[in-house]
Image (tube, rainbow, N blue to C red):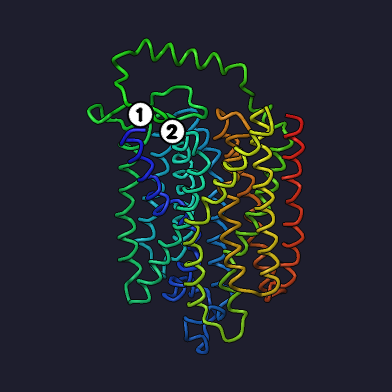
Amino acid sequence: MNNLGVASIITACVECVLCTGVLFGWPSLQFSLDDEGYFHNLCIENENLSSLQNLSSCTASDESFNLVFTVASSFYEMPVLLFGYILDTFGTLAMRFLATSLHSLGYMLLWIMSPSTSVLLYPAMAMISSSGYALWMSNSQLGNLNPSYRSVFLSISSGMSDLSSIVYLFVKLQHDQGASSKSIFMVLFVITVFPWFRSYFLMPKKTIPYPAMSKHHHFGIVKKLQKTLIVGNDVTENLSESPKQSLEIDKLTISSTQKGKKTLKQCLMKAIFWSNLYHVVVIKLRLSLFYGSVLKWLSSFPDIDVGSFTNWFNVVLLCGVFVAPLNGMVADGLISHFKSRFRAEQTAVLRAYAVSMFLTSTFSVILSVAALARSVYPAFVFVLLTKSFVYSGSGGFLFVAFSTEHYGKLLGITSLVISVFSLAQYAIFKLAVSLDPDFYVINIAMLCLTLTTYVHPIVIFYSSRSS
């Protein structure tokens, strides 16, 4: 891999920190905006509600913030089918152009909004969250530049997305120091120039498939700066020196892999696709409910400083940059282990991901137990572990278990279903606020639901035996 490939991967990690997972810092942003009076026009006029610091003072405001998060969570997944189709059909540049446009527009809306125009928070957060996932999708293919470390790169990029919560933690800390939200959002709007730069200079115009069907990948669109990147440890070449030879290599590679291709319908008919879909839907609903209700849950504790615990929650999430690569290392290590035992590579890969998915289910179950036991810090830790494993594991599983030419569409279908079920988070939250303020019954229900996700690793295991 040459310097251009290294620069692309390094800047991809920076982009993941700045853009892709900022939604997971929502508790910090909600705390700051609530303190400035956003959605407080919905509160009942009452002189006793003079302190904006009391997050439990206004149910209408709490529900509005939760609805913003629910909409943003749904849009984090919902447009992925569209983005996946654009990525598979038109290439990386076209998909990133749409994503970066939404990203910049979202921060522009945050910049110009005020407490009297709180409603702008809905489209702003929807644009920012949807574009974040799309940018992560475009960066995920960079792991194919060195297939030996593909799972590790996917896990690292997921970890960097976990680190994105630092963006809204920065907003909260600056707010606590007296900075206005407008000045902070102006800075974040200016930073949106960075993904635009990467789109045109450090990302491929088309895509990088797995396994790589060609060693030649053009990065950037400017002719003078456009170079050729060679996958793996080979050196760079100028494609124009031997175009016929490169074309012959591509045709030979394509013809050799044509027989192994599966149609989208064949991929959708596999049991492991649907078990993976169920597994991810349930676990992400568990995570979404925790993120959307964590401030309300903390405020139900007597004599607790919600602002301080919000900071600690985000500090724990920052550790995702160290935790997320563990899933990739576990998967790659298990693949190497099972390869020595099984002749078929697909069997080894599926066995490895069965273990990974088992761990993910276990973490989500422990998270539900910690929330039920009202153990704050263990709940924070297992939110981190569950999120890190489910995001990196799901994306990596779709990559290796199905035909990569349908990766974007399969990920899009999965994300669309997740987004629909994520809408249930608001209904659950509203029900809990009125009937179950301590979230006791809700946490029992989520514990039972997460226990059913163990079906996925079992299905993977039996699929590996048939392969």
Quarter holding the N terminus is top left
Relative to 11, 27 lies left or right: right
The percent coordinates of residue 28 (x first, y second) are: 46, 68
Crowding at mark 1 (Cα within 10 Å: few <14, some 14-19, many 20+): many
The front one of 309 and 22 is: 309
Up the image or down, 28 lies above or below 57; here it is above
Secondary structure of the residue carrying numbered label 1: strand
Residue shown at 51% from the left, 50% from the top: 325
Report which residue position mark 2 lands on: 145
- Kindly give the residue lying farthest to the bottom in the view shown: 48
Question: Gap between marks 2 and 1, in whole Å?
Answer: 9 Å
Q: Which amino acid does label 2 sit on?
A: Leu
- Kindly give the residue lying farthest to the front in the view shown: 340
- Kindly give the residue lying farthest to the left in the view shown: 224
Report which residue position mark 1 lands on: 229
The front one of 33 and 233 is: 233
Q: Which amino acid does label 1 sit on?
A: Leu
Up the image or down, 350 lies above or below 453; here it is above
State how many labels appear.
2
Up the image or down, 90 lies above or below 359; here it is above
Residue shown at 52% from the left, 17% from the top: 254
Residue shown at 50% from the left, 72% from the top: 310
Residue contact between numbered discs 2 and 1, judged by CB atoms under 8 Å: yes
Toward which corner of the image does residue 2 lie, by quadrant?
A: top left
The percent coordinates of residue 290 (x first, y second) are: 61, 64
Quarter holding the C terminus is top right
Toward which corner of the image does residue 369 lie, by quadrant?
A: bottom right
Q: Residue 435 carries which label?
A: none
Secondary structure of the residue carrying numbered label 2: helix
